[in-house]
């Protein structure tokens, strides 16, 4: 099953040679298939793909098994292909999962709690230090 929702023009570097390859990226069964203009096919398992970066007019993916492999797909991506690709990461794991606004609030509250803890430590920690220990340190 390959219709327009499952194919898009693509550019890729195979990670072995330094040649730029152009053709069609299509989603077939459980694999991403890259087909060159001459008919040569390259199959990429979906669990081997990883998000690399998002540029203004394209999204770039790589392969875990081939560090120099790059797949450049123009935006907007067809929904049939995009749903199979790794989700783009913008800020990092925790922040992308929570969302930027929630992450700012959570980390702000945690920072304020840490500052309050350390600023008030002499008041609540001081009385708990034994006098014998104080005498030994001077």
Image (spheres, rainbow, N blue to C red):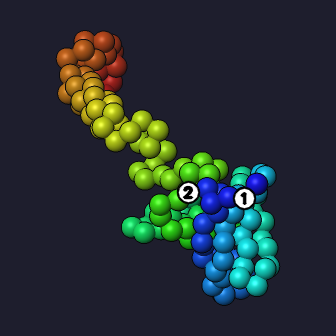
Q: Is residue 125 above or below residue 54?
A: above
Residue nearest the viewer, comparing 50 with 93: 50
Q: Is residue 125 above or below residue 90?
A: above
Quadrant of residue 8 within the rendered picture? bottom right
Kindly report which numbered mark, 2 or 1, lies closer to the viewer in this rendering.
1
x and y, in percent, of residue 46 in the image: 71, 54
Disc 1 crowd rating (10 Å Cα; few below 14, some 14-19, many 20+) is few
Q: Are marks 2 and 1 in contact (CB under 8 Å)?
A: no
For the point 62% across and 60% down, which residue is it? Answer: 4
Disc 2 crowd rating (10 Å Cα; few below 14, some 14-19, many 20+) is some
Apparent side of residue 38 relative to residue 18 in the rendered image (left or right): right
For the point 30% across and 37% down, which residue is it? Answer: 101
Residue nearest the viewer, comparing 74 with 5: 5
x and y, in percent, of residue 5 in the image: 61, 56
Which quadrant does the N terminus fall into? bottom right
Q: Is residue 71 above or below residue 19?
A: above
Quadrant of residue 125 within the rendered picture? top left
Q: Which mark is residue 51?
A: none
x and y, in percent, of residue 82 in the image: 58, 53
Q: Which mark is residue 78?
A: 2
Which quadrant does the C terminus fall into? top left
Residue nearest the viewer, comparing 37 with 97: 37
**Element type at mark 1:** loop
**Element type at mark 2:** loop
For the point 72% across and 58% down, which residue is it? Answer: 2
x and y, in percent, of residue 25 in the image: 66, 67
For the point 30% across and 12% down, which residue is it? Answer: 128
Q: Which residue is mark 1?
A: 2
Quadrant of residue 24 within the rendered picture? bottom right
Between the C-alphas of marks 2 and 1, the distance is 12 Å
């Amino acid at each position: 099953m390959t219709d327009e929702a499952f194919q898009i023009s693509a550019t890729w570097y195979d990670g072995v040679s330094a040649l730029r390859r152009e053709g069609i990226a299509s989603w077939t069964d459980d694999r991403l298939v890259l087909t060159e203009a001459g008919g040569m096919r390259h199959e990429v398992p979906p669990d081997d793909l990883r998000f690399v970066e998002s540029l203004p007019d394209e999204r770039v993916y790589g392969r875990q098994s081939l560090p120099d492999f790059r797949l450049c797909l123009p935006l907007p991506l067809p929904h049939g292909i995009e749903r199979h690709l790794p989700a783009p990461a913008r800020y990092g794991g925790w922040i992308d999962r929570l969302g930027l606004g929630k992450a700012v609030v959570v980390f702000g509250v945690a920072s304020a709690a840490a500052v309050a803890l350390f600023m008030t430590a002499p008041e609540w920690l001081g009385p708990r230090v034994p006098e014998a220990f104080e005498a030994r340190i001077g």
